Image (tube, grey):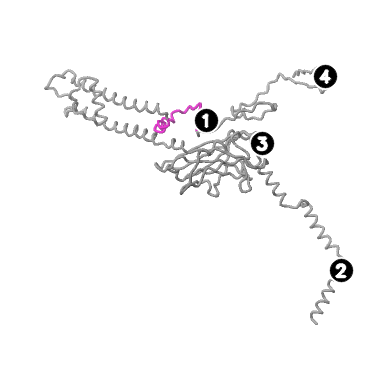
């Protein structure tokens, strides 16, 4: 193997340490990793490197920023055609709605025209003695109109099927049944799409920022939720997830790992009575993923907090879900939310102009772990330590063992004299 060494002449002349750049013609093939894994690998870069923009997993409006690519088993979408149609955009849904009805009308209109053409009804249009399959059907246009009248059960009465056409009677039954199925499918699809509670989530609002401050002597992460409508969300519950890539001790890279953030699951505080805006609090303790994060370290973290609010719409009984997210630049350390609820004459009023407002408050810049360590030290004397306490206990034991037998005898004699005196 041949190595090529480069010397920096400037450093040699100035007497500094000589730098050597070793180049090897042997190429080292790195394992192929996903794009997200390659982006999140640690890099040794200069301090003045511009900060990489954090890509959101969930946008502020609640839409998931994930696109599914290279899906080869597309037939699975057709097996659940109803959900596929409901998930389509409105313009495509309306286009399919119109096309399905138009195609069925044209299809059966063509069959009605073929029956009339095969039976020779077209050649006896002006013959009053001829009994056609469908009266007053003299072309494809009239057959198309008769198909629309049959499937929509309009029945103007001008074109009527006769009892001398058994094939027409069978076709009438088939079109009536299939028309009912098409109506049930398409109208049901449109009804479900119209009644979807997605728009109800537009009136469920989240604060633009999350804050970290002290509450009841504990460091807490907080955000605010509110409902703009007078009709309430029934059985409302809140959840929070931490989205952060991690690498296991075995070297496995897990992109966008999801970790639960406790917002009152064990105490029942995650079940909300959302009549007025509420501040959701997460206590940063040993089980919290923010246990070791301080104010100085927070801007360096690449994480995202996804909050999910679920409940049933009071008017329809359908489940509604609203989502939002907070990245590190949207988490304010040392701030609290401005109160929005005031007591008026006989009622409470919510001022949504102050819903997103915060104010600065005195908050330590240390992490929750460092604060807990300082608090544990403050509860003990300054000179106390485990080793000194053990040494003190050992010294007492040795002093008791070193006491002379005479002292023990004198003490025993004193005890005996006291007993005699008490007897006397």
Quarter holding the C terminus? Answer: bottom right
Circle 2 is placed at which residue position?
Answer: 407
Q: Which residues are magenta?
A: 63-87
Q: Residue furthest front?
A: 345
The picture quadrant where one finds residue 391 is: bottom right
Circle on res. 297: 3
Q: Nearer the viewer, mark 3 or mark 2?
A: 3
Please tell me which of labels 1 and 4 falls first in the chain: 4
Q: Residues within 10 Å of mark 4 (few under 14, many from 20)?
A: few
Q: Residue furthest left?
A: 129
x then y, percent, for residue 111 = 26, 24
The picture quadrant where one finds residue 289 is: top right
Tell me the distance, in whole angstroms, between the alpha carbons under discs 3 and 2: 64 Å
x then y, percent, for residue 386 = 76, 52
Circle 1 is placed at which residue position?
Answer: 66
Q: Is residue 17 left or right of residue 257?
A: right
Q: Residue at x 20, y 20 (%)?
A: 138
Q: Residue furthest bottom?
A: 424
């Amino acid at each position: 193997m041949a190595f090529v060494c480069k010397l920096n002449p400037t450093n040699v002349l100035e007497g500094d340490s000589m730098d050597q750049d070793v180049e090897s013609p042997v190429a080292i093939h790195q394992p192929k990793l996903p794009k997200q894994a390659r982006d999140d690998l640690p890099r040794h870069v200069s301090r003045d490197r511009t900060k990489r923009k954090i890509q959101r997993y969930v946008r502020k409006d609640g839409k998931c920023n994930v696109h599914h690519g290279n899906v080869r088993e597309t037939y699975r979408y057709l097996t659940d055609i109803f959900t596929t149609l409901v998930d389509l955009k409105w313009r495509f849904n309306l286009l399919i709605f119109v096309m399905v009805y138009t195609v069925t009308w044209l299809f059966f209109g063509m069959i009605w025209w073929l029956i009339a053409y095969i039976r020779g009804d077209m050649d006896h249009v002006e013959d009053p003695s001829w009994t056609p399959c469908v009266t007053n059907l003299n072309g494809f246009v009239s057959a198309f109109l008769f198909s629309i009248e049959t499937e929509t059960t309009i029945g103007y009465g001008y074109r009527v099927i006769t009892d001398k056409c058994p094939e027409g009677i069978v076709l009438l039954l088939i079109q009536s049944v299939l028309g009912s199925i098409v109506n049930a499918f398409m109208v049901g699809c449109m009804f479900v799409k119209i009644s979807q509670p997605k728009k109800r989530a537009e009136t469920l609002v989240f604060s633009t920022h999350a804050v970290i401050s002290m509450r009841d002597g504990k460091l807490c992460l907080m955000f605010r939720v509110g409902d703009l409508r007078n009709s309430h969300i029934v059985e409302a519950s809140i959840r929070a997830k931490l989205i952060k890539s991690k690498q296991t001790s075995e070297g496995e890279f897990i992109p966008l790992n999801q970790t639960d953030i406790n917002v009152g699951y064990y105490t029942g505080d995650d079940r909300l009575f959302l009549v007025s805006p509420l501040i959701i609090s997460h206590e940063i303790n040993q089980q919290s993923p923010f246990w070791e994060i301080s104010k100085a370290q927070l801007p360096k973290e690449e994480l995202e907090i996804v909050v999910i609010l679920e409940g049933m719409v009071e008017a329809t009984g359908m489940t509604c879900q609203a989502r939002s997210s907070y990245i590190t630049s949207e988490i304010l350390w040392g701030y609290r939310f401005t109160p929005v609820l005031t007591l008026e004459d006989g009622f409470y009023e919510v001022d949504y102009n102050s819903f997103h407002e915060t104010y600065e408050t005195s908050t330590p810049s240390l992490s929750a772990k460092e604060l807990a360590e300082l608090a544990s030290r403050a509860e003990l004397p300054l000179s106390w330590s485990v080793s000194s306490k053990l040494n003190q206990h050992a010294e007492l034991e040795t002093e008791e063992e070193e006491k002379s037998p005479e002292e023990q005898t004198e003490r025993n004699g004193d005890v005996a004299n006291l007993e005699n005196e008490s007897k006397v």
